[in-house]
């Protein structure tokens, strides 16, 4: 037994020594062994050179997870291949995308749940047509089975195995703007100026590969980006963060200093003959760092350290790290290439073994380099490729989508299934990456994308521009409303992110989390929960509204930013909940949380409560207690509602600020009051009984 709810299984004929795990936060040997009495139990078999693991399920059970896949939320009857793939313009028939998660979450008819994790880095087929069938290449893997009272408990257990995300910097929860590419310093600064001039909230400007000299890592085109550090500083003065892309391919040019140093130190992957492997990517013919070696990860972290220290950017974006190779088999590296992995990762092996974790090892080194450059700041890394457990190192997005209603439709279930696979910090390319959105699609996508854990617009070279004002005044107005809503929600979102970092629960949760026993919620794809208390009802259909059922209980509609528009999702607050809101800001650091707004939805007993997490927004002092976790309460007493604080945790002093109180009534109206003297004193509000 691994624990009361988790067991580790091996096939009867499996060797005593199974390679170390990449998915787990601690070595597999420390996680226990086979439990003789545990349900569900996997059955092991062999077929030719594949290892088969089967879990029997009942027809009415609901299956989820399998990581990053397009298509429906409910995965019953679907077939996924866990093999990281550069899947440009993918659709719901594409079986493998950029990330691999050999994991399935099952919810039984009574609401109890289980999870199955196949602990291998090799290619794995996941067939959910009749029960659960994993078909794994390579060595015979261990299998972890979690059995728990509900899906939340399963995901908590999964996080205890694979690790939890670090609390991200507060600014990373804002809205980000990207394009492939902003071609010059002047263009990037002009885009930033337009956001501020038009009063559209925006947090960060991103730089794709065209900032580089001939697409070479750690370089800048000196004509188009003559002063990158100065540009980053000028963006910062306007309240913008900056994020720059880096790919793993290093141009095989002896005159390139990164390549020359990598050759001298022997840091590149070798082919089956023992020679330096080369493949073509954006800079031309490239070599690829062998991130399975600690020496290579240390070298890469040193490069990151120098890059970040010199330029001063706030975040890094690792792309093309499946790895994607234009002239490689399946647009990737040949599976017989050799990685000289360290013993703690399993020792030397082929690319077939290490392919799925290549990107995860890259972001692990990138994060380390950012911490080395600025140990006092939380690193922000975004990755396209990842593996189970990669939430420890980076946020992620759903890759190269198309500007179409179909791709908008897959966005919600994709990010929900990433969350159900242990990846809380995920988003999409708002508006779609390739092809051209129109105003209707873009504003609908912005309405949804502004409520995702990671919120970034991005578009391909040659497409129409995807800034919010690119589609006319009406679309610009809707996008402004959507983003003002996100910024008002930031205190609540940050509190939910803190919960995700502490527990492993998703930030964005499927509707059935409100009631796992309700079968009508199991396949809801137009609705989702943010944390436990906020319900989002969206529509991915250009002509129709949301048709999803509502969970049982009383959910009252509320609007944080007067953002009422038919293309924006509706927001509902769970009865018995209090949600903290902040002021509208153009960027997260523009002004303090003053006033704080508490939106209250009393339950049938006249009670509500909610929490607010606050810290410095960056750095690591919160780990030593420098934070404030406040529990607010509301109680109806006769004709009045008394709002106050039940308790607080952490050593951070409570700010003195005003408090606006909004009580949602059953008739759709709102009772308002303003607290005088700060949010640390009770507020009395006259209110008729509901």
Image (spheres, rainbow, N blue to C red):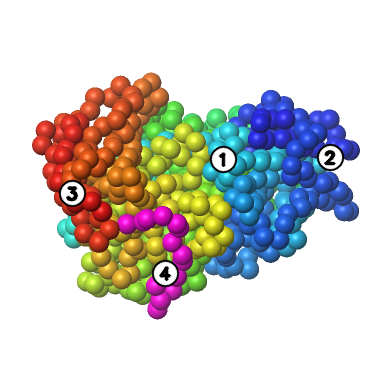
The residue beneath circle 4 is 546
Q: Main secondary structure of the magenta part?
A: loop
* Residue at image location 15% in from the left, 34% down from the top: 678
Picture layout, residue 596 above or below residue 342? below
Mark carried by residue 11:
2
Please name which of the two marks, 1 or 2, marks the residue nearer to the observer. 1
Picture layout, residue 356 above or below residue 651? below
Q: Can residue 77 be spotted in the picture?
A: yes
- Find numbered disc 3 in the image and state the secondary structure of the residue it sits on: loop
The residue beneath circle 3 is 687
Q: Report the side of 619 relative to 327 (left or right).
A: left
Mark carried by residue 153:
1
Q: Residue 4: x percent and y percent?
A: 66, 31
Q: Report the side of 648 relative to 586 (left or right).
A: right
Q: Report the side of 640 relative to 66 (left or right).
A: left
Distance between mark 2 and mark 3 Cα atoms: 64 Å
Q: Residues within 10 Å of mark 4 (few under 14, many from 20)?
A: some
- Find numbered disc 1 in the image and state the secondary structure of the residue it sits on: helix
* Residue at image location 39% in from the left, 58% down from the top: 536
Distance between mark 4 and mark 3 Cα atoms: 32 Å
Query: Could you tell which of marks 3 and 1 lies nearer the N-terminus?
Result: 1
* Residue at image location 38% in from the left, 48% down from the top: 533
Please name which of the two marks, 4 or 3, marks the residue nearer to the observer. 3
Q: Nearer the viewer, residue 260 or 607?
A: 607
Q: Can residue 226 be spotted in the picture?
A: no
Q: Are marks 4 and 1 in contact (CB under 8 Å)?
A: no
């Amino acid at each position: 037994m691994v624990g009361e709810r988790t067991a580790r299984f091996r096939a009867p004929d499996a060797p005593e020594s199974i390679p170390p795990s990449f998915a787990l936060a601690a070595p597999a040997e420390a996680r226990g062994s086979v439990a003789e009495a545990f349900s569900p139990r996997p059955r092991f078999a062999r077929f030719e050179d594949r290892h088969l693991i089967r879990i029997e399920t009942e027809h009415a059970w609901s299956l989820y997870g399998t990581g990053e896949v397009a298509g429906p939320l409910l995965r019953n009857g679907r077939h996924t291949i866990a093999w990281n793939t550069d899947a440009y313009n993918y659709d719901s028939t594409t079986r493998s995308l950029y990330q691999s998660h050999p994991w399935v979450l099952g919810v039984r008819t009574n609401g109890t749940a289980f999870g199955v994790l196949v602990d291998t880095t090799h290619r794995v087929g996941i067939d959910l047509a009749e029960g659960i069938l994993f078909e794994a290449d390579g060595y015979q893997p261990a299998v972890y089975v979690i059995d728990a009272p509900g899906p939340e408990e399963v995901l908590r257990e999964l996080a205890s195995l694979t690790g939890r995300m670090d609390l991200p910097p507060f600014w990373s929860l804002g809205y980000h703007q990207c394009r492939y590419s902003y071609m010059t310093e002047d263009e990037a600064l002009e885009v930033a100026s337009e956001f501020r001039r038009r009063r559209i909230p925006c947090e960060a400007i991103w730089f794709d590969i065209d900032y580089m000299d001939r697409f070479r890592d750690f370089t800048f085109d000196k004509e188009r980006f003559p002063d990158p550090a100065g540009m980053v500083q000028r963006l910062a003065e306007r309240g913008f963060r900056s994020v720059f892309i880096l790919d793993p391919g290093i141009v095989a040019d002896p005159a390139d200093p990164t390549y020359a140093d990598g050759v001298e130190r022997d840091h590149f992957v070798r082919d089956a003959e023992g020679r330096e492997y080369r493949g073509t990517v954006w800079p031309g013919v490239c070599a690829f760092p062998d991130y399975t070696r600690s020496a290579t990860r240390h070298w890469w972290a040193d490069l990151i350290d120098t890059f970040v220290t010199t330029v001063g950017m706030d975040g890094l974006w690792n792309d093309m790290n499946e790895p994607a190779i234009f002239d490689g088999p399946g647009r990737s590296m040949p599976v017989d290439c050799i990685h000289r992995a360290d013993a703690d990762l399993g020792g030397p092996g082929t690319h077939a073994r290490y392919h799925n974790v290549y990107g995860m090892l890259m972001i692990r080194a990138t994060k380390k380099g950012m911490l080395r450059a600025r140990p006092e700041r939380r690193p922000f890394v975004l990755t396209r490729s990842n593996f189970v457990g990669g939430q420890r190192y980076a946020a992620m997005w759903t890759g190269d989508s198309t500007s179409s209603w179909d791709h908008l439709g897959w966005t919600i279930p994709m990010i929900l299934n990433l969350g159900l696979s242990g990846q809380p910090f995920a988003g999409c390319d708002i508006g779609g990456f390739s092809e051209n959105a129109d105003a209707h699609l873009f504003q609908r996508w912005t309405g949804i994308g502004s409520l995702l854990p990671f919120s970034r617009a991005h578009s391909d070279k040659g497409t129409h521009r995807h800034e919010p004002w690119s589609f006319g005044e009406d679309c610009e107005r809707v996008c402004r409303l959507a983003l003002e809503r996100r910024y008002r929600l930031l205190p609540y979102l940050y509190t939910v992110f803190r919960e995700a970092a502490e527990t492993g629960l998703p930030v964005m949760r499927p509707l059935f989390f409100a009631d796992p026993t309700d079968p009508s919620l199991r396949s809801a794809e137009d609705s989702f929960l943010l944390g436990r208390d906020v319900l989002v009802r969206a529509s991915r259909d250009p002509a129709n509204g949301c048709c999803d059922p509502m969970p049982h209980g009383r959910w009252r509609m509320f609007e944080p930013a007067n953002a009422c528009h038919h293309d924006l999702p509706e927001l509902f607050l769970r009865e018995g909940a209090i949600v903290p809101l902040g002021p509208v800001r153009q960027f997260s650091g523009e002004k303090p949380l003053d006033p704080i707004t508490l939106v209250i939805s009393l339950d049938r007993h006249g009670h509500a409560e909610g929490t607010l997490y606050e810290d410095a927004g960056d750095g690591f002092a919160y780990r030593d207690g420098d934070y404030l976790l406040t529990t607010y309460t509301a109680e109806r007493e006769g004709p009045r509602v008394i709002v106050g604080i039940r308790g607080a945790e952490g050593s951070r002093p409570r700010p003195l600020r005003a408090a606006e109180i909004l009580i949602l009534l059953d008739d759709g109206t709102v009772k308002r009051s303003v607290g005088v003297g700060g949010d640390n004193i009770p507020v009395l509000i006259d209110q008729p009984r509901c």
